[in-house]
Image (cartoon, coloured by chain):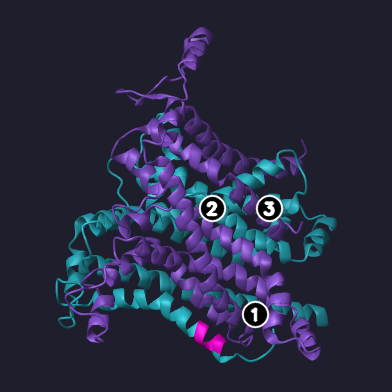
Amino acid sequence: MTGKARGRWLVVAIPYLWLLALFLIPFLIVFKISLSQDAIAQPPYTPVFDLAAGWAAFRESLGELSIDNYGYVLSWDNEFIEAYGSSLWIAGISTVLLLLVGYPIAYAMARAPKSIRPTLLMLVILPFWTSFLIRVYAWMGILSPEGLLNQLLIALGIISPDAPLQILATDTAVYIGIVYSYLPFMILPLYSALEKMDETLLEAAADLGCPPLAAFWKITWPLSLPGVFAGCLLCFIPAVGEFVIPDLLGGSDTLMIGKVLWTEFSVNRSWTVSSAVAVLLLLVLVVPIVFYQNVQQRQLEGR
Amino acid sequence: MRKGLSWFNVTSIALGFAFLYIPIILLVVYSFNASRLVTVWAGFSTHWYWQLFQNEQLLDAAWVTLRVAFITASVATVLGTMAAITLTRYGRFNGRMLFSGMIYAPLVMPEVITGLSLLLLFVAVNIDRGFWTITLAHITFTMCFVCVVVQSRLVTFDRSLEEAALDLGCPPLKTFLVVTLPIILPAVVSGWMLAFTLSLDDLVIASFTTGPGATTLPMRIYSQVRLGVTPEINAACTLLIAIVTVVVIIASIMTKRQEMERQKAERLAAAG
């Protein structure tokens, strides 16, 4: 290998091998453990592959793998299927809400004078830099029964002091938390799609007598669709597996799969069942993830 | 876009920013509350900040978190920049699909899955969990964010500059250091900062991959927050917000200045 080729090889190989070892192989391990059984041992599952023990022992361990965990997770007696469904539902509704809240903001930003756009952009990004946990925590103080929202509503005489609104520990609080935390992820792709738009198109439409609202649906909306897709996927996929928001803002009846996986892992201490939950969650998300990758590739690699 | 904002545009910006900022402002205001009850205002006080600086556990956790974040950001920036060069400059190669898949998937992968899979890897290879396993996990997911940030800069810049240097016999490494790196530096710096704050911020992946003895600040805050809202946590959060805000503002001023100088130099070069 010449020096040049070797340098080039290294630039590709180092991040490649890193991701293989710490991103891809871990998934294969999760898959393998999802087929294992819990055991009181170190590590707490069986079988453990031991390549040093020879081929026969390896084949024997292979025979011990089973799909029992999947049967357990997919049985209607347990709450898992419900949790998958309600996670998809909560994430879906939140994504629609995010689009409804984010689109007008991104649209207004793209129409703002060029000189103040960087400042507006910075103001959208800034909350994203502050801790996610802190932003969720901030809502706990606002939404609790004796919290600031209820105090305000009582002071304004809208509700009586005896019957404060119960928002914290409900699904409503989860929606508020998701919309609040993911809003920058929705606004940024929308803004970059809207900002690129050619304003003469709208002028031409207006000159030809197209009313503004019709011009929006015929021109602006279709041209902003790449941003809409990117924003929705960027919010929807992580929201399905969200753990912190349902845990801190949701109630005990808020069923989300991220929380179920965490509980299965840290409270019930079943590594094999949590692995099966993770594999199935990945299966549920594989279509949107592949879709998202295509959107990303088109944007970043100019293809 | 046509010039001029309608009342609808102004209202959506105003309401949007109010929604984004009011919760954070309230949190900061109530960290100066004299009362133990977070929701009742009882006068201005810095009491909770003093309390905070005597809380050894919290300070220890903050120190662990800062070290993890610093190492993470530095390694992730190098790896992420390499990956960005691979994806924008090397065209097609065997395994490219897999590579770009492994770069984009972690951006949206639910944290519980990433965390669990890394934990099971660390158990399988039997290494002691703690400081270094958190750092390895953080490098892995933050390098993908760095890659995307650097990539978006590499796509837009004029490749003929690099090609000219290479044609004139400049070795590839030197071309990168002298031509490419100065141009993409603002993106590399913001990649570093993004990795730093993502690592600073992470609760779920750190909780999965940690072992005895390594507790990060988000883990400590989380375990206290679960018990309820306390002014001390408000104070800790306010300090974190202040640090991040100052760093982001300084960095954005720096990159803006650099960008302006670069544009001036380009104009001069074009004129001369």
Residue in the image at 52% along x and 39% along y? A22
Judge by depth and name the residue closer to the eye, A82 or B58.
A82
- Nearer-the-camera pick, B237 or A277: A277
Q: Amino acid at mark 2?
A: Val
Does B141 sit left or right of B160 as displayed? left
Residue that numbered label 1 is attached to: B260
Q: Going by the image, does B184 lie left or right of A100?
A: right
Asked if labels 3 and 2 touch by Cβ distance under 8 angstroms, the answer is no
State the quadrant of the N terminus of chain B. Answer: bottom right
The residue that label 3 is drawn on is A294
Task: Give the letter of the chain under mark 1.
Answer: B
Chain (purple): A
Q: Which residue is outermost to the front?
A: A76
- Residue B272 visible, this orientation: no
In the image, which lettered chain appears cyan? B
Query: Which chain's residue wears label 3?
Result: A
Q: CA distance from mark 2 to mark 3?
A: 13 Å
Quadrant position of residue B181? bottom right
Residue denoted by label 2: B108
Marks 1 and 2: same chain? yes
Q: What main secondary structure does the magenta stretch of the protein show?
A: helix
Which residue type carries mark 1?
A: Met
Where in the figure is residue B223, as x and y percent of width and height? Answer: 25, 53
CA gap between label 1 and label 2 equals 34 Å
Place of residue A125 in the rendered image (x, y in percent of width and height, measured from the top left): 50, 71
Q: Could you tell me residue A82's position as x and y percent?
A: 41, 45
Which portion, as a residue range, is magenta?
B8-12
Kindly identify the residue that appears in the image at 69 percent across and 76 percent down.
A217
